[in-house]
Image (tube, coloured by chain):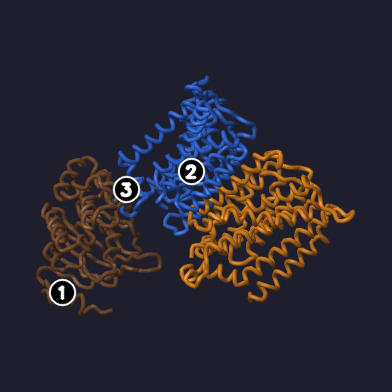
Amino acid sequence: MTPMIRNVVLPLAALIALALTPIFVIDSYTRHLFIIAFIYAIIASNWNLSLGQCGVFNFGHLTFFGVGVYTTAILAKTVGLNPLLAIAAAGVTAPIVAFLMAAPVARLKGIYVVLVTFAFSQLVMQLVLSQSQITGGAEGMVRIPYLKIGDYSFIRDYKLGYYYLCLGLLVVSTIFLILIARSPFGKSLKAVRDAEDYAVSRGISVSRQRVLALALSAIFTGVAGGFYAIYLRVASPEVFGFGTLTLALSMLLIGGVGTTYGPIVAALAISFATESLAGIRGFEEARYIVIAVAMILVLRLAPEGILGLFRRLTG
Amino acid sequence: MIDTLFATLVSGLVLGSLYALMASGLSVVWTTLGVFNFAHGALMMIGAFFAWTLVEPVGLPLPVGILCGALGAAAIGIVIERLLVRPYYGNRNMLLITVMTTLAAMIILEKSAQMIWGARLKQLPRLIDGEISIASATISAHEAVMIVLAPLVLAAIWAFTVRTNIGRSLRAVGQNQDSAALIGINVPFAFALAFGISAALAGLTGALLGSIRFITPAMGADPLTKAMIVVIFGGLGSLGATAGAAYLIGMIEAILVLWLGLYWTPFVLFLIMIVVLVFRPNGIFGGNQ
Amino acid sequence: MERLLEVSDLSAGYGAVTVLRGIDIHLDAGESIGLFGPNGHGKTTLLKTISGLIRPTAGAIRFSGDDITAARPPDIVNAGLIHSPQGNTLFGDMQVHETLELASIAKRAKGDSRKNLKSVFDLFPRLEERRTQKAKTLSGGERQMLSIGCALMCVPKLLMLDEPTLGLSPRLKKELAAAVGDIAKSGVPLVVVEQDVEFLMALTDRLYMIEHGEVVREIDKANAPDHEEVMKLYFGEVSH
């Protein structure tokens, strides 16, 4: 496969196929699966920016998503802001939170990065749980305003509006990630990952890079969270939980980190697999077990791909 | 004023005991294997459910239930070591891979518990009923037992690793695997033992906590997070530093709850942690990494 | 004559890198042997492979009549084949007496732990002076003593020493050489890795020269080289 086919033709073909899908898929459940898959694809591919390309052992990526969810939920429901603007606002608050998290993380190494990022996400969850007069606490928020333009509700025509809006978000996010990878900043990330000492000696600041990578990776993750809140019309602290984290992590691992598209493809495949499992009686909880076992098996049986990732991570 | 302070001190001791038991288990595995066990909180939860099953439906006495809870958690801990950690010994990415495999183990344990025991809230009876008043502070007798038991358990673990050859072998393996093997230490056994002891500590904590909090599949998440804050403060290097940090965090948390209320405490705790990390990237007492 | 140790056609390495290529050495009952040769040519790897730290890719190792090729380190220790690694590799945060006591963890050594500790302290009085000090605070020579002391705590039937005098001052080197001599005199057969061929000649019965992971020369009392020849072995004939 030539790079031309891999980087341009295949993604474009996939995009056209996804754009045409609603013509063939006209039931709202299947479209719902696609929308959820797009959301996870945005989460996983942006996580790749910090964990994969920058080598920050960030286990708090879902914090950005959760912050997006609650930003939009609060602005749209409590403040009464237009839902579209509320979604856009999530693209601002999430990077700010990422910035807060990055400040201590930029200087740390190894397991302490894992611990701090992870504890951070847990503590943001604690904050959400405790501020129940604003966030609804453990119950979460319900009946968040839905999206409509003029008289047209996005939920109509079997969620047609949401489908295209979410696909559009995924496309914009992907282009954003590709532009970053090709920018001088993206190239400096690669330089640090592959030869840290040399890069540092050429004047690249690793701390600054980590802060930037975390903040950039939060933008579309936050927006995806905002969309999630408006689309499902609920905000629940579950988004910070281990379930969502493991699901997104498994997509990143199984998809691999070599390309921007790997995690996206894996996200689509795994979202469909788990959401379909969720539809089977008795599998609402067991699907997470299936995913966890799959993750273990990939780590154990496909070490080349996964190890390739780690080799790049640890340089 | 003095009364309030004293009450805060006592509640800080209760929290500190809980965190010390949890965090010392993490520390044992870390110092021996260089693995951070994300399933530690889930092992605590499993200990609580085992104890509950033996005490409530089966009808065994509570102390037996607590003991079996600890042993059951230890057994599962050893299985986790065998299946999810041992395959990666010697792998240079072991740290990250095992973060992910133990994370997966946590999900499996939590979701399995939910499917086996359901979502209905459960609670164990208390070891001793009634309340104890120390000067002006009143706590339940069960919490008083925890306050006394935690340092005893920690002292026992410390004595085990300093006074006995099997315990010393855990430290030796953590410091130099090859040299340990060359004086006849069975390294894989030491690894399994470390995991077993750590999981037993978690299971014990869960079974004790099951009398004063509700037993749910997710009950391990909060203590695990707090134990993480403890090890971030204290570093993971030594049992003493970890236990010291656990009591310190317990006290700080109790004071914060008194001062700011329950809502803002976790947030402020994290802010303090950030400040500490900016100035001491290896923790307050930490040197080892 | 019974062979205590027999290594035949042994190959081993680290991952894709082969270090040992078909090594053949043996040690008859009642003798000691020495291994020498340039650094990085496989002497330490050979000891590590014999003691089970490295799995051989080919060949066989027999100790005292038993095949130990695939045995695990603790079982090899328990059989009495003890490897004392270079001294800077011990347990830094552990005290001297703890380390020595721990070294009697093997079944064969458990019973006589107290008696053995006393004889180690007799051999190395400095260790007794420093018994509550942590290993990382010891000097290079003291660490070497601790490493050998640990090996003695295991009650060796055959003791393999890896460069016991490496990097020591001449005075300390003499002290350690004397101690190693005492161990040999007490009847423990030795496999000694050293750079100093004259020291080896005095201590052992036969020498193997190891180069590029192979035995390139065997020396015994009959064909012992003089000083000049030794220098030649290292710097002359050695082809790189």
Q: On the image, numbered disc 3 is attached to which residue?
A: B185
Nearer the camera: disc 1 or disc 2:
2
Q: Are marks 3 and 2 on the same chain?
A: yes
CA–CA distance in space, label 3 to label 1: 39 Å
- Mark 3 or mark 2: name the one nearer the start of the chain: 3
User: Does B6 appear above or below A67?
Assistant: above
Q: Position of residue B89 (x, y in %)?
A: 43, 54
As shown in the figure, which amino acid type bears the numbered disc 3? Ile
Chain for disc number 3: B
Q: Colour of chain B?
A: blue
The reply to whether residue A288 is visible in this rendering is no
The reply to whether residue A187 is visible in this rendering is yes
Colour-to-chain, brown: C
Secondary structure of residue under mark 1: helix
Please report contact status of discs 3 and 1: CB closer than 8 Å, yes or no: no
Q: On the image, numbered disc 1 is attached to which residue?
A: C230
- For disc 1, the neighbor class at 10 Å (few under 14, some 14 to 19, many from 20) is some
Residue B230 — which label?
A: 2
A239 left or right, relative to B82: right
As shown in the figure, which amino acid type bears the numbered disc 2? Val
Secondary structure of residue under mark 3: loop
Q: B233 or A113: nearer the eye?
A: B233
CA–CA distance in space, label 3 to label 2: 31 Å
Q: Colour of chain A?
A: orange
